[in-house]
Each structure stands twice: as C-alpha cells, then as structure tokens.
Image (cartoon, grey):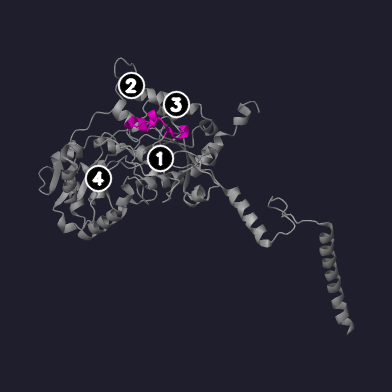
Amino acid sequence: MPPRARTLLMPLAAATLLVASTIFLFAATGARWRPADTGLPVPAADFSAAVIESAVTDAAAAKEELSFVDENGRPDDPASSSAAAARCDPSHAAVRVFMYDLPPEFHFGLLGWSPPTDGAADAAMWPDVGSGAAAPRYPGGLNQQHSVEYWLTLDLLSSSSPPCGAAVRVADSRDADVVFVPFFASLSYNRHSRVVPPEKVSRDKGLQERLVRYLMAQPEWKRSGGADHVIVAHHPNSLLHARSVLFPAVFVLSDFGRYHPRVASLEKDVIAPYKHMAKTFVNDSAGFDDRPTLLYFRGAIFRKEVKIDSWKGGNIRQELHYMLKDEKDVYFAFGSVQDHGASKASQGMHASKFCLNIAGDTPSSNRLFDAIVSHCVPVIISDDIELPYEDALDYSKFSIFVRSSDAVKKGYLMRLIRGVSKHQWTMMWRRLKEVDKHFEYQYPSQKDDAVQMIWQTLARKVPAIRLKSHRSRRFSRYDRGGK
C-alpha cells in the first residue's frame, strides 16, 4: 500500500475504534439516552426511534394546548380524543375570547330565560345552545335593530364546535386576546329604562351599577385596567349610567353621536351595523331599467331634539323634503319600516335605484343597512357618520357621499344623482350584491357575515389593545409598594 494511502486510512481507523469503544461502554454500563431538550423522562432500554418521535410530538402538542370551553361554558377535556377531533382550536382563531359567566339577569334572563333547576352548576349561566336546542328568541320589531350583543354572545357559546369562526372562547382569561362582557345593554335599555314604582331606580340603571361593581372586582379588569374588555352598547342610549366609568373598555357601538370624545372614539372602539329591518333582496336581477323610482326615502321628516355637544347634526330632512317633493321619480315614505311593514318598505327599496340615508337623531340610522341589503345604492348625507369595518370595506365603491352643506343647495342633489350613468350605477349595484352578506346577523353565524366581520374588526384592534394594556402596567408594581 502506498505511504499516502496509509496516511489517509489511519485517522479513519482511529475514529472507527473510538465509536466502537463508546458503543461497548454504553452497553456495558447500561446507560440510557435522554433527549437533550424535550424534557421527556428517560425511556426504557429497548426503545425505538418511532417511540421517541411520538413522545416528542405529544409533548409539543401539550405545550401548545390552549384552554377552551364547550357550549355550556365547561372546559373541554384535552385528553378526550372525541373532544379534540370536534372542536375549534383557539390558536387558529383570529381572536381568542374569554367571556365572563355573568348571571342570567344580565343577558338571556332579560329574554325570559332561566336555567333548568336540575342543571349542572357550571351550566346554570347559559342556555344549552350547542345541543341542538333552540336559542332564546330576541323580541321583534325595532328592538332587533340593536341586537348585536345577542348575536355575538350566541356565537361565543357555540364557538368551540365547527364550523369554526373568527372568534373562539377560551376558559382561561390569560389565554385570551380580549375579555367579553355579556351584558345585553340595548335590550335592558329598551325594556327596563323606566322607573317602575315603588322602585326609585330603573332596572336598567340597577343592572349597570351592579355590572360596574362586578367588573371593578375582577382580576381581569384590574390586570389591564379594562383596556382588553369588550362591551356592546349599540343603542345610542344604552349603558348611559356606566359608560363614563367603563370607558377604558372597547365599546361596540352604532356611532359616536351621543358619546363624549374622551369616552368613545374610532381609535379605541368598534362600529357595528344595525340589524336591518328590510328583507334582503335574494336572487336580485332587478337592474337599472327594472327600478322605476330614482330616489327613495323612508323616515320621519322632523328629527327629535337631542342636546348632545358631540353631535351637531342639523335637521336637513325637512329642507330636502320641500326641495324634492315635486320630483316625479322621487318617493318619500314617512315613518319607519315598522310603521309601513317590512314587506312594503322592502318593495319600495327594491324598486328604487338610489336610497337616501340622511342623518337622524344620531349620525347613523338603520336606513343605510336596509338600502344595502335591498341593493339600492345608498346616498349618504351625514357628515359625522362612521361606518362598520371601513378599514376593510371601501364604501365609495357602492355608495354616494354628499356633504350636508351641498345637499341643501337648490338642485345640487338631483343633478348629482341624475348624473350617475347606467354603467356607474350597475357597478355599484353589483358591488352591493357582493357585500350584503357582511351585514347579515344570524345564528349559527356564517363566514363573513356581520358577526364574523365584527370579530375580525376586533382582532385588528388587538395589537393596539395590548399596547394600551402593557403601558398601563408600567408603574403598577411600584404602586403596590414594590411587591
């Protein structure tokens, strides 16, 4: 063998000898291998690679496991294979939500629901909507306009089971992005805002006072100062007595017309659509030439007098009425959908090309959402209006915006509307048919409907919520005396 070959083989032989010696040493001493960074116990002597791989996989899955609850508010058992196979993973949700187990008097108790007397203690707070039982019905009529809290609560109660939505309820608040407060504030205002003798305080105000005491005592509120809490107060007059105390929370509102800027703002809060009262125009093929009415308006002519410093809307309805009453292809229907009937009002909007949405007692109104689901191009005359999920939807693609100061100029509004070509109108009409699903409240919730869009909007708020929450803790340790 050439000297150069012997020189190359010597290190190889030495390495082979070292490996053989090591194997012999481990076999002789009975040493057992321990995974370096898995934290697993030492396996038995006759282990296999497949066993190790399985153990590592199981450990990683356990580490990533997030707590979640079933439809009745009970934590699911992670060890149950059937539960794991038929649940929604919180780590895949757009937003993870912890919901307080408030007594029924704050939510479904307002609908006449009461827990079964023979039910489990941990299920006493909620109706068993996940077992196929019907959910307690929300009252009809105009009450439904502000029923947002009802739909969001129902969605959370069933969020652990497929089909999985944007929000999943978790059992541990430390796993949550936001904390949901299930108070049916709008329903409480609509039904119980008047004092009933011999009581000195209305039931609605009493509930708000008890809610404030409850939240102030919760570790979740103390931990964030309320910054990560979500409270629905969609009716403009709901939560009237508690809003100045609970304002650090994220409010879900219809608009900011009756809120002080320090209490509510677009930066902090979420705008949600009204539940529309008109019937959705299903399979709409009524294009430009099939809608004989050019402009449609339904609503009161005179606004209520509302003295709110932050809302300075003028009563332009009367002025517009006098300007447009002689136009042959313009229709004014006085009164609400409830006054006329949903069917009649829907027919009027379905037969119209444009629908007026004029500022009412507050900057927003249900008329906008009735127009959207009727595929009647909205003409929005409300300078201070804020719109649902406008960071995701470009309303200018299916609506026309008119400044109030321009709307009352003689001839301005009709020249603007008559100047919209058939092609331009058709493009907006087609877009309306694409986006109307975003304004539908329903249970079970469906992909991209109003419930899911609200959760997605909240998910986009989470980074700002975390920033605010973290900033609020800067000096909390020192405020407690360094403990």
Which one is in front in this view, the residue at disc 2 or the one at disc 4?
2
Residue annotated with mark 3? 212
Calculate the distance from the C-alpha at mark 3 to the C-alpha at mark 4: 35 Å
Which one is in front in this view, the residue at disc 4 or the one at disc 1?
4
Q: Which of marks 3 and 4 is nearer the N terminus?
A: 3
Q: Residues at badges 2 and 4 in contact (C-beta under 8 Å)?
A: no
Calculate the distance from the C-alpha at mark 3 to the C-alpha at mark 1: 23 Å
Calculate the distance from the C-alpha at mark 4 to the C-alpha at mark 1: 23 Å
What segment carries the magenta color? Answer: 104-125
Residue annotated with mark 4? 370
Q: Is residue 120 in the magenta section?
A: yes
Disc 4 residue crowd, few under 14, some 14–19, many 20+, Cα 10 Å: many
Q: Residues at badges 3 and 1 in contact (C-beta under 8 Å)?
A: no
- Residue 202 circle label: 2
451 lies above or below 222: below
Q: Which of marks 2 and 4 is nearer the N terminus?
A: 2
Which one is in front in this view, the residue at disc 3 or the one at disc 1?
3
For badge 1, the amino acid type reads Leu
For badge 3, the amino acid type reads Val
